[in-house]
Amino acid sequence: MTGSLPVTLGKQDFGGREGTLLTFKLHVKNDDGKPREQMYKFNPPIVRKF
């Protein structure tokens, strides 16, 4: 996982089995080199991109 600071932390309700999970946004560059935010969800011990 690569990106730049700052990282934005939060919580989001995913409903169903997952419920409310911690999330974070990492600033990454797309294929064109332009910056964008990529969100990840943390369901211990697994981190998934969405």
Image (cartoon, grey):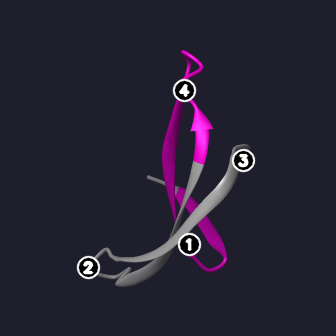
Please report whichever mark, 4 or 2, sits nearer to the chain's N-terminal start: 2
Q: Are marks 4 and 3 in contact (CB under 8 Å)?
A: no
Distance Cα–Cα, label 2 vs label 1: 14 Å
Distance Cα–Cα, label 3 vs label 1: 14 Å
Q: Residues within 10 Å of mark 4 (few under 14, many from 20)?
A: few
Please report whichever mark, 4 or 3, sits nearer to the chain's N-terminal start: 3
Which dot, 4 or 3, sits closer to the camera? 4
The residue at 54%/26% (across/down) is 30
* Residue toward you, 5 or 14: 5
> Which residue is identified by label 2?
15
> Which residue is identified by label 4?
30
Please report whichever mark, 1 or 4, sits nearer to the chain's N-terminal start: 4
The image shows residue 1 at horizontal and vertical percentages of 72, 47
Q: Secondary structure at mark 2?
A: loop
- Amino acid carrying mark 2 in the image: Gly
Q: Which label was assigned to residue 42? A: 1
The residue at 34%/84% (across/down) is 19
Q: Which label was assigned to residue 1? A: 3
Verify whether residue 42 appears in magenta: yes
Q: Residues within 10 Å of mark 1 (few under 14, many from 20)?
A: some
Q: Residues within 10 Å of mark 2 (few under 14, many from 20)?
A: few
* Residue toward you, 18 or 33: 33
Verify whether residue 32 appears in magenta: yes
Rendered position, 45 above or below 49: below
Q: Which residues are magenta?
A: 27-48
